[in-house]
Image (cartoon, grey):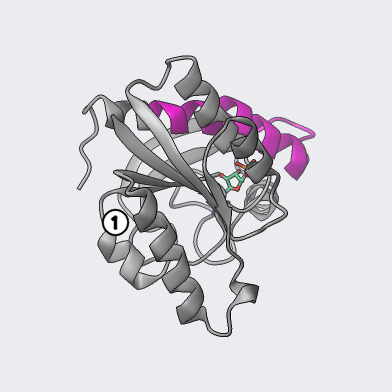
């Protein structure tokens, strides 16, 4: 049984895709052991609650130093003892100790075809705004391992999505989610659970 912890900051549609895929058996032999949010107001927490998944919100604002927050974050993850940590729209810089503790066992979904439109400052809608500004005709999503850089870890899987005439950042974001993110992330987790993608 693959034990998965999911880290979120916002709406949690990717989390929902994982929850649904586990419950319908599309992701096999997997348990979501916990959902962590840095944002107590994240709708993703409601999704976890509704699915009966242990969840926890710890905000950096509640601590006097970043180190203390990092410690609380790491302690919480360790408590769940996950085999795999999934960053699904998680907008926190991962502490160095956490990267070394979970190296090769932490993955992230990014809403572009890395190495395009990624790195510091590229998250959420901003990614799609930049893709449209550049005029690319194809974009997509990437799942990659997490290392010390921003969106620099080894690429595991990518899925392309066409940009269409008249796209706004919001329309493009929705298409990338529907056609790429919500398909790719559950597929990768299942491949890990089935041993088709090796951790570590
Ligand atoms: C998703 O599009 C995800 O790929 C993106 O944030 C969104 C979260 O949506 N992540 C990044 O941009 C990370 N650099 P969700 O909360 O509905 O899953």
- Res. 122 in view: yes
Which of the 4 image quadrants contains residue 45? Answer: top right
- Secondary structure mainly formed by the magenta segment: helix
Q: Farthest residue in the bottom direction? A: 64
- SS of the residue at dot 1? loop
- Res. 137 in view: no
Residue under the point 75% across and 35% down: 171
Membership of 114 in magenta stretch: no
Residue under the point 52% across and 42% down: 54
Given residues 152 and 129, the one toward you in this image is 152
User: Residue 185 in the image: x percent, y percent?
Assistant: 45, 33
Q: Which residue is mark 1?
A: 102
Residue stretch rendered in magenta on the structure: 161-187
User: Residue 1 in the image: x percent, y percent?
Assistant: 28, 29
Residue 52 appears left or right of 67:
right
Given residues 44 and 153, the one toward you in this image is 44
Membership of 165 in magenta stretch: yes
The image shows residue 195, relative to residue 59, as above or below, that is above
Which of the 4 image quadrants contains residue 177? Answer: top right
Given residues 128 and 74, the one toward you in this image is 74
Residue 55 appears left or right of 106:
right
Residue under the point 69% across and 37% down: 172
The image shows residue 62, relative to residue 83, as above or below, that is below
The image shows residue 56, relative to residue 197, as above or below, that is below
User: Residue 75 in the image: x percent, y percent?
Assistant: 39, 64
- Dot 1 crowding, Cα within 10 Å, few <14, some 14–19, many 20+: some
């Amino acid at each position: 049984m693959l034990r998965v912890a999911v880290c979120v900051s916002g709406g949690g549609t990717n989390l929902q895709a994982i929850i649904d895929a586990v419950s319908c058996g599309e992701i096999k032999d997997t348990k979501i052991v916990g959902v962590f949010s840095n944002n107590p107001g994240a709708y993703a927490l409601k999704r976890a609650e509704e699915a009966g998944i242990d969840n926890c919100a710890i905000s950096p604002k509640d601590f006097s130093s970043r180190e203390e927050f990092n410690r609380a974050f790491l302690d919480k993850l360790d408590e769940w003892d996950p085999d795999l940590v999934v960053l699904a729209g998680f907008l926190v810089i991962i502490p160095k100790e956490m990267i070394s503790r979970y190296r090769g066992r932490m993955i992230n979904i990014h809403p572009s075809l890395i190495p395009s439109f990624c790195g510091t400052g590229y998250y959420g809608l901003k990614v799609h705004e930049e893709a449209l500004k550049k005029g690319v005709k194809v974009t997509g999503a990437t799942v990659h391992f997490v290392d010390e850089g921003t969106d620099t870890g080894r690429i595991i899987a990518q899925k392309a999505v066409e940009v269409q005439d008249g796209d706004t950042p919001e329309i493009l974001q929705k298409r990338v989610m529907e056609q790429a993110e919500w398909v790719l992330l559950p597929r990768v987790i299942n491949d890990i659970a089935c041993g088709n993608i090796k951790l570590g």
